[in-house]
Image (cartoon, rainbow, N blue to C red):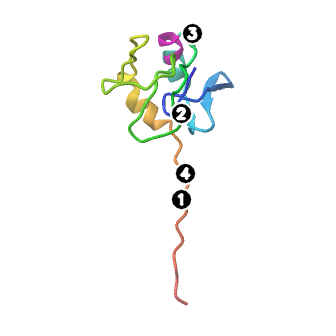
Amino acid sequence: MYCPHCCRGMRLDQGVFVCDPGGMVLSRNLHTTLTERFPEERPRPCGIEVGRRITRWFCPGCGVPLGKEMACGCCGQSIHDLLWLLVEYIRTPTVRFFAIVKL
């Protein structure tokens, strides 16, 4: 399974897909939904640029960029209905704020 956010291969960890570079750990329900929708991983075509960009998403089964409707041009599957769930599972870098206090 390819990470829908960065297109790198995901690994299984405790029964769910995890993408370390893309910063995504799926819930069991989302893992099940994606596995049912994309039962087999196809080889990613050559020349596909991987990596995170704010508005770019990839097919978890084919590894190709998705169009505006979030549908794959290769397999015809869509992640449009899962987009908000996927966004929730993306880790963002931790930002630490420090307060300056005058003594």
Label 2 Cα neighbours within 10 Å, binned few <14 / some 14-19 / many ≥20: some
> Which residue is label 1 attached to?
95
Q: Residue at x 45, y 31 (%)?
A: 86
> Which residue is label 4 attached to?
93
Q: Residue at x 38, y 38 (%)?
A: 55
Considering the image in quadrants, where does the C terminus appear?
A: bottom right
> Which residue is label 3 attached to?
40
Label 4: element kind: loop
Callout 2, which amino acid? Val
Q: Which mark is residue 50?
A: 2
C-alpha gap between disc 3 and disc 4: 31 Å
Q: Residue at x 53, y 59 (%)?
A: 95
Q: Nearer the viewer, mark 2 or mark 4?
A: 2
Label 4 Cα neighbours within 10 Å, binned few <14 / some 14-19 / many ≥20: few
The magenta segment is 34-38
Dot 2 or dot 4: first in sequence order is: 2
Dot 2 or dot 3: first in sequence order is: 3
Asked whether disc 4 touches disc 1, contact meaning CB atoms under 8 Å apart, the reply is: yes
